[in-house]
Image (cartoon, rainbow, N blue to C red):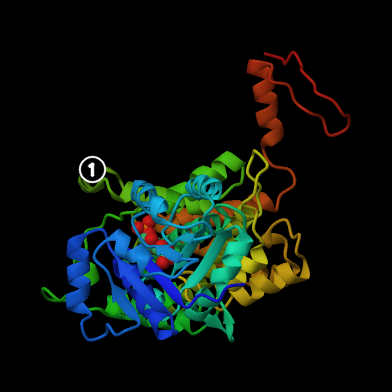
Amino acid sequence: MTQNTHMGVIGLGPMGVGLTFNFADNGYTTVVFDPWTDARTTFADKFIDEIDDRVVLVENLESFVESLPTPRCILLMVKAGDPVDALLEALYPMLSKGDLVCDGGNAHPRDTDRRGLDAEKRGFGFFGLGISGGEEGARHGPSMMAGGTVDFFDTVAPALNAISAKHNGSPCCSHFGPGGTGHFVKMVHNGIEYAIMQLIGEAYLLMRDAAGMSYGQMADVFDKWNNGALSSYLFGITAGILRTPDDLGDGVLIDKILDQAREKGTGQWTVRLALEFGIPVPTIAEAVSARHLSRYGDDRAKAETLLPKPNVQSNVDRGSFVDELEQALCAAVMVSYAQGLHLITAAKPDGNGWVAKPELAGRTWQAGCVIRAEFLEKIIAAYVNEPELPNLLMAKELTEDWATSMPGLRGTLCFAIQYGIPVPALSSALAYYDGFGNSRLWSSLIQAQRDCFGAHTYERKDKPGIFHTEWLK
Ligand code: 6PG
């Protein structure tokens, strides 16, 4: 195994910059380049004091390639999609056989599969590296999910392990499988991220509008939750967000932010692939749809004046309401992980890769990433004890937790319905839990209807074979 002493980073956005200095701090001479002149100038100006002989900024792709000893190790931190292909086309003619290119953006796993095959044909190594943790993580320790040829990964693993976040001393950087598997796991990470963010948003709405709580009171609650069973990055930052003053005016900033959520696409990809694979991820899907619903700002404002609302007097015992809500969130957050982890164990319909180990995903997400949480320890234990666990809901380790948290979810939903507060992610988490835990659902009737109007046939419980019936009409 060749021990690299040099890293190349292309792309000087916040992530590329953070990773560059992280590599440099860990003893790697890091050659950096950005195709945009402005980005290079800003980098040179902004980091003038931090740039030392371990960070080499170059002005063009040729110098970039020439400055790296072979076999080269190049990390692309450019916008996902076409810019990656364009850059690869420019880069490949300059590389030598055996050089390694690694895409650290949020690429679609299918694109990474395609790029990996193309690189292999040309004699280069290529792997997709999902990187989580934002700017802060990139600089001080991200969580990293790799996929691609394992031999190539091994050559760069010491560098990646060095810069990654550590949980109890273990690097949160793993190789998950061939081709796009790393990007697939990162995509699912983002799907879970969407679900948890939406659940937090719903808790915020319930506290604000049904319990009439102030931003300061809500921030205190998030702090309390972050010191309990829900201890996790997203709950922690929410407390700070709710306290942050408006830098351009009075009051807290959250009050001034347009109520329309944007996205970059990984949540949608998760849902689209889950639909394709036949894996239910309703809480993630609701989180994506909730962002889309939020964008109809003008229509929502008109509809608000048109649609009758429940007429309830606010009579909430805040203490017990908040306790129940905490349990509801414990249940729904765990259900969101269950859905995401179910998806990463699912094979593509054409039978090729991307199947990843949930235990490994759990370990890789324990530090550095956006969905890091204390309770991942429990999730990992469930898969260590039963690696083939079909669904996290069935883990023996969680039975007592469900018994404690589910009444809170049911109670919170009754409350939300009564007050007319939209809680799509919380509701879908309960529906998933109740549906998965029920062996006699509605599907016999759906099969009968299909056969009745379309002769689509059905199977019986008591006899093998395919049946069709002339139904009474
Ligand atoms: C991470 C994040 C990151 C993602 C942002 C924005 O793990 O650091 O998942 O990769 O790009 O969270 O995602 P949206 O713009 O789609 O919300």
Packing grade of label 1 (10 A; few <14, some 14-19, many >=20) is few
Question: If the image is split into quadrants, where does the N terminus sit?
Answer: bottom right
| Closest to the observer, 307 or 345 | 345
- Residue at 37% over, 67% down: 9
Q: Is residue 17 above or below residue 310?
A: below
Q: Quadrant for ligand 1? A: bottom left
- Residue at 69% over, 16% down: 455
- Residue at 66% over, 72% down: 380
Q: Position of residue 132 (x, y in %)?
A: 45, 68
Residue 233, quarter of picture = bottom left
Q: Position of residue 366 (x, y in %)?
A: 55, 75
| Closest to the observer, 457 or 115 | 115
Q: Is residue 440 rendered to the left or right of residue 158?
A: right
Q: Position of residue 242 (x, y in %)?
A: 30, 75
| Closest to the observer, 98 or 390 | 98
Q: Position of residue 129 (x, y in %)?
A: 49, 62
| One can see residue 205 in this view | no
| One can see residue 146 in this view | yes
Looking at the rendered structure, the number of numbered marks drawn on it comes to: 1
| Closest to the observer, 57 or 370 | 57
Dot 1 beta carbon under 8 Å from ligand 1: no
Q: Give the residue type at disc 1.
A: Asp
**Can you name the residue that lies furthest to the right here?**
463
Secondary element type, mark 1: helix
Q: Is residue 294 above or below residue 406?
A: above
**Residue placed under numbered mark 1 in the picture:** 299
